[in-house]
Every structure is written in C-alpha cells, then in structure tokens.
C-alpha cells in the first residue's frame, strides 16, 4: 500500500527530528574537491575516500593543481580505493575539461557536469545539491534500498526510484532528503540486518520482515537466575 501524504510527511519529520542538519560525509573544501571525492566514491566507502583524500586535497584542491600533480602521483594517493587507476584517469581528464571549458570552475549545470569523465547523473545530483543548493536526490544503493524496503518510493531501477522520491517528497524536505535517506540506509536500514528496533520510522515502514531485539538471556547470580535487563 502506497504512503499517504500524511505518512510521507511523518516519515521525513521523524528523520529530521533525529538529524536536523544532515550533511555529506565526504570531506571537501570547495565544489571541486567535492566533485573529485564523489567520483572517487563510486564502489567505495566515504570513509575510505576521506582517508585517501586527506593528504591529496592539501596539495591539489583545484583543477590546475590536480593536472600539475599528474595521473601517476594522483594514483599513488588514491591506490587504497577500488578501481583507482581508472578513477585517476577520469579525475585528470575532468580537471583538464574544467579548465578548458569552464574556467577551472565546477559548473552549476547538470548537462555540463554529466559531460565530465566519471560523472553520471547520481554524481551530478550530489554536486548540485551540496554545492549549489539544488533540490535533487542522488539515488545510490542505500537510498535505493530504503525507498524499496520501506515502500516510500519503490522502483525497479535508480531512475525510477529517483523520480518516485521527487514526486512524493514534500518541497520543504527536498533539500535534505538525499542526506536523510542515505544516512538512514547507511546506519539503520542496513542491507543484511536492518536495525528495526531503533528505527525512527519503524511504525511507518512497510517492510514485513522487521528485525526484533535479541532475547534477554538469564544470568546466574548467587544461585539465582536474573535477566540481564535487571542487572
């Protein structure tokens, strides 16, 4: 059964209450470093990307500096990240294109962003949302799972889920919806064993196989059995 408008409002209100000011977990200092971090984050964790870019962004936080650093040295910085060789090639290529076509600036335009090597719709949505305040939703594996599992906006592919979320999400929540949903999927509505007992939208969620708290095991003390809950 589809969510009603009141249920959708309650869903986002609960997420907002638990995290009033959500932010991306990718470390960055400007639109360019966020763009690079997003490209590096494909099939990698934000934690892993942040570890690799900590030193990198101290010496290469603009397209010009990145091109000067070069693909080989960039690869050395990001070799702990999966697919790092291809990503290094894309980062250098997109940096050159930013210099050649956009004066070294990250464009506030979806089409221009998606022309950059290694940048697809999801990555463009992140940059537009975080750097320029556009009301976009970047659907990754976490958001795809949350949207389908909860029943908020089910879909067969990421674009269908994105369109569904854009359609049902109230305007007042659109700016931060991406962050709330991804963080909820990353830390609560996890893939293998969702943390339903502590979920703030548990009562609204349509997931039938909700997990339950582990049983309280009795503990023997002074010849008597007492539950751990009473200790």
Image (tube, grey):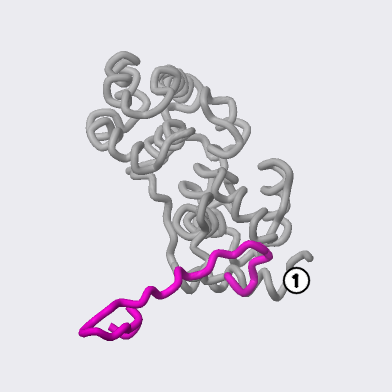
- In this figure, which residue is indicated by the disc labeled 1? 4
Image quarter of residue 231:
bottom left
- Overall secondary structure of the magenta section: loop
Q: Residue at x 32, y 28 (%)?
A: 80
Look at the numbered disc 1 and give the secondary structure of its residue.
loop
In this rendering, the answer to whether 66 lies above or below 166 is above
Q: Nearer the viewer, residue 3 or 188?
A: 188
Q: Say if the magenta span includes residue 201.
A: no
In this rendering, the answer to whether 141 lies above or below 93 is below
Q: Residue at x 32, y 40 (%)?
A: 50
In this rendering, the answer to whether 68 lies above or below 4 is above
Magenta part of the protein: which range? 202-231
In this rendering, the answer to whether 40 lies above or below 209 is above
Q: Is residue 121 left or right of residue 133?
A: right
Q: Nearer the viewer, residue 83 or 202?
A: 202
Q: Position of residue 216 (x, y in %)?
A: 41, 75
């Amino acid at each position: 059964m589809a969510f009603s408008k009141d249920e959708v409002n309650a869903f986002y209100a609960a997420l907002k209450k638990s995290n009033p000011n959500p932010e991306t977990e990718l470390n960055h200092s400007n639109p360019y470093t966020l763009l690079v971090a997003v490209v590096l984050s494909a099939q990698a964790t934000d934690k892993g990307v942040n570890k690799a870019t900590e030193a990198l962004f101290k010496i290469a936080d603009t397209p010009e500096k990145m091109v000067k650093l070069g693909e080989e040295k960039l690869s050395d910085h990001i070799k702990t990240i999966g697919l790092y060789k291809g990503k290094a090639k894309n980062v250098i290529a997109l940096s050159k294109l930013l210099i050649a076509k956009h004066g070294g600036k990250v464009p506030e335009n979806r089409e221009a962003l998606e022309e950059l090597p290694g940048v697809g719709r999801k990555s463009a949505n992140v940059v537009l949302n975080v750097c320029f305040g556009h009301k976009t939703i970047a659907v990754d594996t976490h958001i795809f799972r949350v949207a389908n599992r909860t029943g908020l906006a089910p879909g067969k592919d990421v674009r269908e889920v994105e369109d569904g979320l854009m359609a049902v999400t109230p305007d007042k929540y659109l700016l931060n919806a991406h962050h709330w949903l991804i963080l909820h999927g990353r830390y609560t509505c996890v893939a293998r064993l969702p943390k339903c007992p502590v979920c703030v939208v548990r009562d609204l969620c349509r997931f039938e196989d909700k997990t339950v708290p582990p049983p309280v095991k009795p503990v023997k003390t002074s010849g008597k059995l007492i539950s751990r809950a009473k200790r």
